[in-house]
Image (cartoon, rainbow, N blue to C red):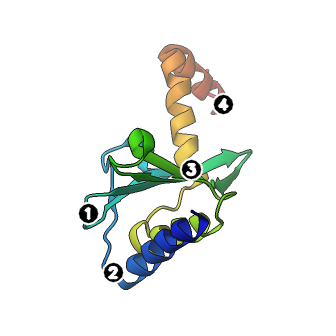
Amino acid sequence: MKSQIESILKNLIDSTKNGSLQWTEHDPKSKARGYKRKMVAKGSDDTIFHTCIEYRLVGETWQLQENGFFIENPDLPDGCYLISKYQNPMVVELRDCIRTHFCTDLNPTIETIEELLEGISKGISISTFRENKLNDLGID
């Protein structure tokens, strides 16, 4: 089974690099698309491949996660097979290939999170938020 998985991953990587396999974003209107994207491709036999390219914020540093890779086909047990980087490190190579070719604008910034956090702060109490901002500016 290991050789078949390697063959699938190698074919996916090569097909992604040469442009014969197109990956699409599962939800291009997602609010999380600035740091997380589920990417999907379909084989000629209707097998669906997908992975999530996701950054997580650790402290003030964005870290690219090493998520698993899914193969969906009705003939597989439970219709799905998950490959982790521990089973095959080529999963990380495939993720990077997809990111390079189809997610070139996926580059999260701290400013994005700062804006979100400010919105959360406003959501607690807009009047207190406004009052605190005025106090920070020295306006009473």
Q: Is mark 4 on a helix, strand or loop?
A: helix
Residue position for label 2: 19
Quadrant of the image for the N terminus? bottom right
Residue 103 numbered tag: none
Q: Distance between the residues labelled 2 and 1?
A: 18 Å
Give the foreground label among 1 and 4. 1
Residue at point 63%, 33% (across, down): 137
Q: Which of pointers 1 and 4 lies earlier in the amino acid sequence? A: 1
Q: Residue furthest right?
A: 59
Q: Distance between the residues labelled 2 and 4?
A: 53 Å
Q: Which of pointers 1 and 3 lies earlier in the amino acid sequence? A: 1
Question: Which residue occupies the foreground of this view, 71 or 123?
Answer: 71
Q: In this view, does 45 lie above or below 18?
A: above
Q: Which of pointers 3 and 4 lies earlier in the amino acid sequence? A: 3
Q: Is residue 139 left or right of residue 7?
A: right
Residue 136 numbered tag: 4
Residue 138 sits in which quadrant?
top right
Mark 4 is surrounded, within 10 Å at the Cα level, by few (under 14), some (14 to 19) or many (20 or more) other residues, namely: few
Q: Which amino acid does label 2 sit on?
A: Gly
Question: Which residue occupies the foreground of this view, 52 or 1?
Answer: 1
Tag 3 near tag 2, CB within 8 Å:
no
